[in-house]
Amino acid sequence: MSRGCSARSRRMSFSLVRGTWPERLGASMIGASATKGVPMKSAYRILAYLIALEVVVQAAAIAFATFGVLAYVDGGGVLDKASEGEHAFTGAVGFMVHSVNGERVIPILAVVLLFVAYFARVPGAVLWSAVVFLTTLVQVVLGVAAGAVPTLGWVHGALAIALFVVAVIAARKAEVPAAVEAGPG
């Protein structure tokens, strides 16, 4: 009745077809079950911390630009529509960095974080990444609208702190406790 195959090899080939071979072929040797979902969890944590870091870059860029403008004007420089295309003062690049970073880089990171959250297997990851995304969206709208309504800059600055905090909370949700990392023993 047997076709030259042992029962074990038939089970093994069946498990290969089903796609469960890591668990059957030595998951304990390679640690596959212990590391299941870890790459996405790490990606989620790194992306969330990157967003928090980008908020710090935003603050530094706008401070650099603002202090550059102040020093330029204090030195007798004139800033008007005629000098708009010129980078006549130190720190002018700060405005560009703040704009590109805030309107493109951080929103892209927030969308990727939201996508990765679905696969990260982190409790609360989707919720916190959605909060990061919505806070980022409001930040972009406030940043663009503040050109016409400068008082929105107050809210924009305060919400930047909130974005930093929620991004750090999101990242911390993916932290592995030291006792789990060390393993038993």
Image (cartoon, rainbow, N blue to C red):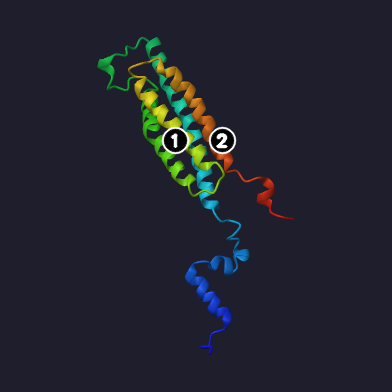
Residue 109 marker: none
CA distance for labels 2 and 1: 13 Å
| Residue on which the image places disc 2 | 169
Q: Residue at x 44, y 32 (%)?
A: 134
**Percent position of residue 54, x then y:** 47, 33
Q: Residue at x 51, y 27 (%)?
A: 162
Q: Secondary structure at mark 2?
A: helix
Q: Residue at x 58, y 79 (%)?
A: 8
| Residue on which the image places disc 1 | 133
Q: Earlier in the sequence, mark 2 or mark 1?
A: 1
**Percent position of residue 23, x then y:** 58, 65
Badge 2: how crowded within 10 Å, few (<14), some, or many (20+)? some
Side of 80 where 172 appears, left or right: right
Side of 1 where 78 appears, left or right: left
Q: Secondary structure at mark 1?
A: helix
**Percent position of residue 73, x then y:** 37, 11
Q: Tell me where residue 104 sits by quadrant.
A: top left
